Amino acid sequence: MPRRPRLHIAGAFYHVMARGNRKQQIFYGDKDYEVYLRLMRKYSQRYNVEVHGYALMPNHVHMLLRMGAVPIAKFMQGLQQSYTQYFNKAHFTVGHVFQGRYKSLYVDHDEYLLELIRYIHINPVKDGLVEEPTKYRWSSHRSYFLNKPTFVKTSYIKNLLAEYGGTVIDDYRLVPESLPRPAGAPDDSATVSCRQLFFSPPGLPEILNELCMVTNIEPGVVLSSGRTQQAVLARRLFAYLACRMAGYPLKDVADYLSCSVVSVSKSLRWVEETMASDAGSHITKDIERVKLKLV
């Protein structure tokens, strides 16, 4: 079965992640990190890609990119192939450096964009590499915190923070549990709902497991025909994540849930209408948390 082509939206933000082959290291010393950053800058300038954030970890890479007219695939092909050639020559190895296809996730809300830059910059702390983000040399955190000259575009995120009442990027409590949308900002839910956000889509069992962890409900309850409020809500959220976020056909999701296509369609409409209302903040929060786990 041919791979699904990646959706490209010029001007859109994407979270891109690439792992080392078999989760092995892709950076062994300062020169490796420096070469990767130099190549990132080279290809971002060549293909008019804005780099808004990154974290280079020993065995994987996170990037927050804003794409121009050229698709992500072209940028990533140049970056990854060039680094692979360098790496194999420098370390006397052959073969793949990166594990299969990189992952790319379309960033559909301002709130998620702010949560994502936090997630990227806090990675070195979570992995025990440093005690605080400012001490990690191989992320874009210093570009924000120290205003260090760099190819990273920081103004958009900083302006967004100002709209939401934040002033600094180093305070990782700046993204509260629920961010108010700035006055006059458009409601994205209707235009975003039909887009496929996962481009190397997770399996339905994986989506279910992550959703159950977030909502604290057993998978068997979701897959049953139980009518408790929690079970019904979980099934609706699952249908939304599977169809709208991962691009699965309604029939596939209906078969997985042992229900009708009409039921799945009603679930999608309910989630979209609820998210667009004042009562939808908790649903949006759960959906964004699941999306982060599926990256």
Image (cartoon, rainbow, N blue to C red):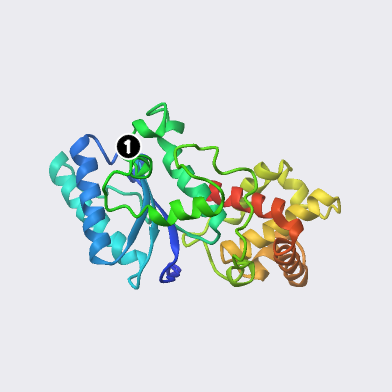
- Residue 214 x %, y %: 66, 43
Name the residue: 43% across, 44% down. 120
Residue 17 lies left or right of residue 257; in this view the side is left
**As displayed, is residue 20 above or below residue 207?**
above
Name the residue: 66% across, 62% down. 240
- Residue 73 x %, y %: 34, 65
**As displayed, is residue 108 above or below residue 123?**
below
- Residue 236 x %, y %: 73, 59
- Residue 60 x %, y %: 36, 43
- What residue did someone put label 1 on? 58
Q: Nearer the viewer, residue 230 or 166?
A: 166
Secondary structure found at label 1 = loop
Name the residue: 80% across, 49% down. 230
Q: Dot 1: within a 10 Å radius of its alpha carbon, few (fewer than 14), some, or many (20 or more) residues?
A: many
Q: What residue type is labelled 1?
A: Pro
Name the residue: 62% across, 50% down. 179
Residue 195 lies left or right of residue 62; in this view the side is right
Q: In which quarter of the image is residue 46?
A: bottom left
